[in-house]
Image (spheres, grey):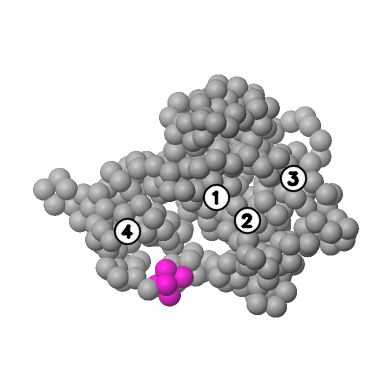
Amino acid sequence: MKTTSKLSGGIPAHFSGHETFPLRQMWLKKAFDESIERGLIRKSTFSDENAIASFGVGKNMVASIRHWALACGVMRESDDGFRIGNLAIEILQDGGLDPYAESPSTAWLAHWQLAGRCFRSTTWHWLFNHVTAPTFTRQELEEPLARYARELDPKHRLSASTISRDLETCLRSYAPRAAGGSPEDFAEPLLGELGLLQEAHKGQYAFRRGPKASLHDGVFAYALVDFWDRKAEGQSSLAFETVAYAEGSPGRVFKLDEESIAQRLIALSDFTGRRLEWTDSAGLRQVHRKHMTREDIKNMIRRAYD
């Protein structure tokens, strides 16, 4: 079932498609490897009778791989099928930056795409940007998420089971089940290594806020510029509070504390050749930006895999 409505900015809200399977490490590569000339993947790749044999997984998992490849920006829909994105080619091609999705930078970029950019991943965006409770259970989140969904589209009523399944899949993406369940539940989800969410007690979760050792400055800089382009295009400076606390900001999405954000912003001057520069004058904390080419932005990502 496809469940969509409109988020601010015109992005469709989406609460399904993953078939309740969290994103696995090799799934983005599996989708990528189906591309043929000029980065095209035929739509029939995910639906014809050969798909199960081709991907080596069951029918529902094939649908899940398709969903995650779209949600993480590996591919996008086009008239003639699916087109692989330039960044995905850079990372996932054989001999690329991280063809087997082993680097934490790939997992951080996938998380940014889901919780920051929010394409086909409304629950991911909502969880990391709107939930402020120190601890929570899935059941406690169901009604607030349902209310958020109603605000997005008052005419469309999501079933309680759809909300519950989406939340369960989201939480298990970051904090896999500790015990019980089928062998599938023990397959390591790609986002589980990020340490963003922990299951403090059975069924009770908490965010892990603070510095993130595996988050490379290149990924942080890329996320900051991406957020800037979408939320404050044309502005030459951003306030510290915006970077730290605005909806969809690196501070919120990566669950960084103020000191960690400040340290990263200070370091960005050297890292970006002064294209991003931090100032703290008379209590006014800001990051300033000079013109950046696409190649400059790509280089941030390349350095995250050094």
Is 297 covered by the magenta stretch? yes
Q: Secondary structure at mark 2?
A: helix
Residue at the disc numbered 2: 70
Mark 4 or 3: in front is 4
Depth check, front residue: 280 or 291: 291
Q: Secondary structure at mark 1?
A: loop
Residue at the disc numbered 4: 233
Residue drawn at (57%, 25%), measured in percent from left and top? Answer: 142
Span shown in magenta? 294-298
Task: Give the label on residue 119, or none.
Answer: 1
Residue 88: x and y in percent read 59, 66
Cα distance in 3D space between marks 2 and 1: 8 Å
Residue drawn at (25%, 49%), measured in percent from left and top? Answer: 239
Depth check, front residue: 124 or 192: 124
Task: Give the label on residue 28, or none.
Answer: none
Q: Is residue 142 above or below residue 220?
A: above
Q: Amino acid at mark 3?
A: Ala
Residue 61: tell me if it is visible: yes
Q: Is residue 157 above or below residue 3?
A: above
Cα distance in 3D space between marks 2 and 4: 25 Å
Mark 4 or mark 1, earlier in chain: 1
Q: Amino acid at mark 4?
A: Glu
Residue 212: tell me if it is visible: no
- Classify the position of the N terminus by image quarter: top right
Mark 2 or mark 1, earlier in chain: 2
Residue 28: x and y in percent read 67, 58
Cα distance in 3D space between marks 4 and 3: 40 Å
